[in-house]
Amino acid sequence: MIRLYDFRFSSAAYRVRIALNLKGAPYESVSINIAPGTDEQLSDAYRQINPQMRVPAIEVDGRLGVQSMAILEWIDETLPGPALLPADPWTRLRVRAFADTIACDIHPLNNLSPRAYLRNKLGTSEEETMRWYAHWITVGFTALEAEANELPRQDFLFGPVPTIAEIALVPQVANARRFNVDVSSFPRLLEIDAACRALEPFRRAAPEQQ
Ligand SMILES: N[C@@H](CCC(=O)N[C@@H](CS)C(=O)NCC(=O)O)C(=O)O
């Protein structure tokens, strides 16, 4: 059984929930409440699970794994079910690049601890912090919308089924909406997001279902 150290509003954990659901893999969710003021990720007990003090982490047969994108690849490599990456190496590169634009270039800048640093150490106001948040989503989504529109029109970005690209996209769109970022100028991304959220594995992984 896979144990997932999880939090409903963690978009990185949301990625892992989607991947496990797509594979049809049962898992036990252990909630680590990272909400400011609760900060369970900073506890000594959780530091033993993930020294980086972030969610998600997985525990399988006594072994621990961290970093959602590495976990997604492990899931794809070890669990039966639909492939999360396409077979063609060049398409795999493009799928990973799409996902990494979110996981490496948008999400880390907007995460809880960088925002807390902006506010508490650099003295930005709530309004400035939210401008920062919206800025990095807008910059990243502008590139991804262009990429999505270059691809041949299919049900999902890279073919007839969702891949790691959609697994990264849907939680990031959810974050944007949660923080009232205007995403109306990214129609193809929104179309893909809606197509994914209509699928049961994505629906069950959504924050409101946790
Ligand atoms: N690159 C990491 C990011 C993990 C991460 O930053 N998780 C956030 C929630 S989405 C977190 O735990 N934040 C707590 C904090 O910043 O203190 C991954 O993809 O797993």
Image (tube, rainbow, N blue to C red):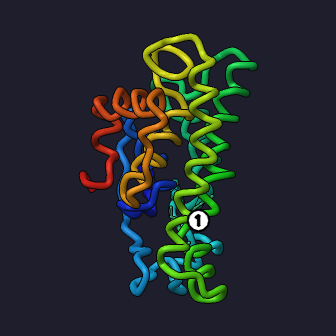
Q: How many marks?
A: 1
Q: Quadrant of ligand 1?
A: bottom right
Question: In percent of the image, x 48 and y 48: which residue is there?
Answer: 172
Compare residues 145 and 14 and report the one nearer the observer.
145
Quadrant of image for the C terminus: bottom left
Decide if ligand 1 comes within 8 Å of the CB at mark 1. Answer: no
Residue 125 in the image, given as x and y percentages of width and height: 52, 82
Quadrant hosting residue 25 = top left
Q: Is 38 situated left or right of 157 in this image?
A: left
Q: In x, y percent, where is residue 163? A: 53, 28
Determine the image quadrant of residue 113.
bottom right
- Position of 117 relative to 141 (above/below): below
Q: Position of residue 9 (x, y in %)?
A: 38, 61
Q: Judging from the image, what secondary structure is the residue with disc 1 in?
A: helix
Residue lying at the far left of the rendered structure: 209
Q: Choose between 181 and 44: the one closer to the eye.
A: 181
Q: Pointer 1: residues within 10 angstroms few (<14), some, or many (20+)?
A: some
On screen, residue 125 versus residue 27, left or right, reads right
Residue displayed at 41% across by 87% down: 37
| In this view, 94 is above or below 74 | above
Q: Is residue 180 visible?
A: yes
98 with respect to 168 (left or right): right
Q: Is residue 48 above or below residue 144?
A: below
Q: Which residue is mark 1?
A: 132
Kind of residue at disc 1:
Trp
- Frontmost residue, 28 versus 174: 174
Q: Residue at x 54, y 62 (%)?
A: 133
Q: Is residue 66 visible?
A: no
Q: Which residue is painted at 66% across and 85% down in the image?
A: 122
Image coordinates of residue 120 in percent, x first then y, are 58, 88
